[in-house]
Image: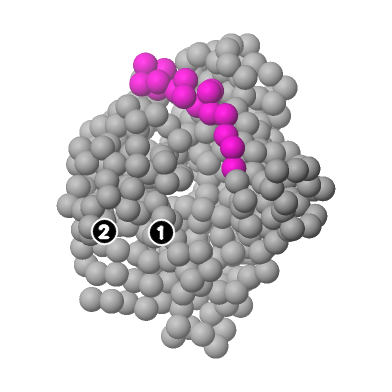
Amino acid sequence: MVMWQPAASGCVVRNLNGDTAGGAELPNRKIRPYPSPVALPCDVLVIGAALLDVHARSRANVVHGTSNPARMMSTPGGVGRNIAENLARLGTRVSLVALVGPDDAGDRVLRETAEAGVDVSLVMTGPEPTGTYLAVLDRDGELVIALSDLTGTEGLTPERLSAVASAIEEAPYVVVDGNLPQRVVAWILERAASGGARVVLDPVSVPKAALLAPVVAQGHPIAVVTPNVDELGPLSGGDADPLRWLHDHGVQTVWTRLGARGSQLSSTGGRVEIVGHPVNAIDVTGAGDSMTAGLVSALLAGAELATAAAYGQAVAELTVASPHTVRPDLTDALVRARLAETHRGRADESIHTEG
C-alpha cells in the first residue's frame, strides 16, 4: 500500500509587472519567441514538445501499400506536454516549457493543457506551425508506425531558454523530453547541475536515444533515465554493458521499460524488477509519458524509488486501457485503486530485488 499524499495542484506565475495568475492563464497568442512571465515555485518543470496528436486505428488487419478503414481522433500531445498533463492530473504542481505556432492547433494545445491544470505561462509562440504527431495503430491498438513533425520544438534554443534558466536551476525536478535538440539537452543539464535540480531524461525513441548518447557521455548528473529495452543500447552509444556505462557517466538510476513484462530499476546499489500486470490494451500511445509522470509524482510525494516505479507502472497500465493518450479521468485515487487491485494476492511477486 502506498502511504504518501500528493502535493496540492496549481502553480502560481508572476509576469513582468509582478502580477500573479493561476495555471489556467493563457498567454497572448501573438508571436512570442521568448517567455515573458517567470514561474514561481512549481515542483516539476517539464521542457519539451507540445504538439497536436493524430491517432489512426485500423478497423481490421493492416494491409500495407493500400488504404485501410480506420477510426481517427486528434488530441493535444507531445512527450513533454503529455508528461506535464499526467503530472497535473495526479495532483503535482507543474510548469511546461514548450514552443507552439500562432495557429488554431497551438491555441487548442494551450487551452486544453491549461484546463488540465498545467501552468502554460512559459510556453512560447514561434512563427512555425504547431507540430504534429501521427500514430498508426493496428486493430489491437499496437503501434504500426509513427511520424512526427517537430519543426516547432526544434526552435527551442538555449538562447530562447535562457529566460527560464533560473527556473531550471531552482526546480526540485526537471523532466527533459528527448525530442529536444542535442545542444539544448546539454544546456539544460548544465543549468540543472548548477542549481542542484534532479533531472529525469526520457530518450523517446531509438534514433533520439542514439543522438543523446554523446550528451550523456559528458557526465552531467542525471537522476533517472527512462529508456525502453530497445533504446537502452543506443543511449549508451552501443556499449556492451549499457547499464554500467550509464552509471559511469553520471546517471543515478536507469528505469528500463519492458512492455507487458514490467520494468527494471538499476542503480549502483543493485537492480529491482517491477512485475507487470495484465491489462486489456486499447491504445499504447502515451504509455511511456504517463509512466514517467507517475514515477516523478510519487518521488516528489516521498515514495521510495521501487514504490514510485510501481506507481508509475500502474499509471501506464491505466493509460493503455483507455483510448486516450492522457486519461481525462486520471487521479491519484484511481492509481491507488489499480495498485490495490493488482497487488491483491500477488504482493510478494510485484517487486523483486537483485543484489
Residue 160 is a magenta residue: yes
Q: For this rendering, which residue is in front, 65 or 77?
A: 65
Residue 281 lies, in percent from the top left, at 66, 64
Residue 337 lies, in percent from the top left, at 62, 71
Q: Which residue of the protein is positioned furthest toward the left in this rendering?
A: 248
**Cα distance between the residues tagged 2 and 1:** 11 Å
Q: Residue at x 63, y 11 (%)?
A: 30
Residue 310 visible in image: no
Look at the numbered discs 2 and 1 and tell me whether their residues touch, using CB distance below 8 Å.
no
Side of 330 where 185 appears, left or right:
left
Q: Is residue 142 above or below residue 72?
A: below
Specify the segment rendered in magenta: 146-161
Side of 150 where 267 appears, left or right:
left
Q: Earlier in the sequence, mark 2 or mark 1?
A: 1
Q: Is residue 354 above or below residue 326?
A: below
Q: Residue at x 56, y 60 (%)?
A: 316
Residue 252's image quarter? bottom left
Residue 196 lies, in percent from the top left, at 26, 40
Q: Quadrant of the C terminus?
A: bottom left
Which residue was labeled with disc 2?
243
Q: For this rendering, which residue is in front, 33 or 247?
A: 247
Local secondary structure at mark 1: helix
Q: For this rendering, which residue is in front, 139 or 190?
A: 139
Q: Residue at x 63, y 70 (%)?
A: 279
What kind of residue is marked 2? Answer: Leu
What kind of residue is marked 1? Answer: Val
Which residue was labeled with disc 1?
229
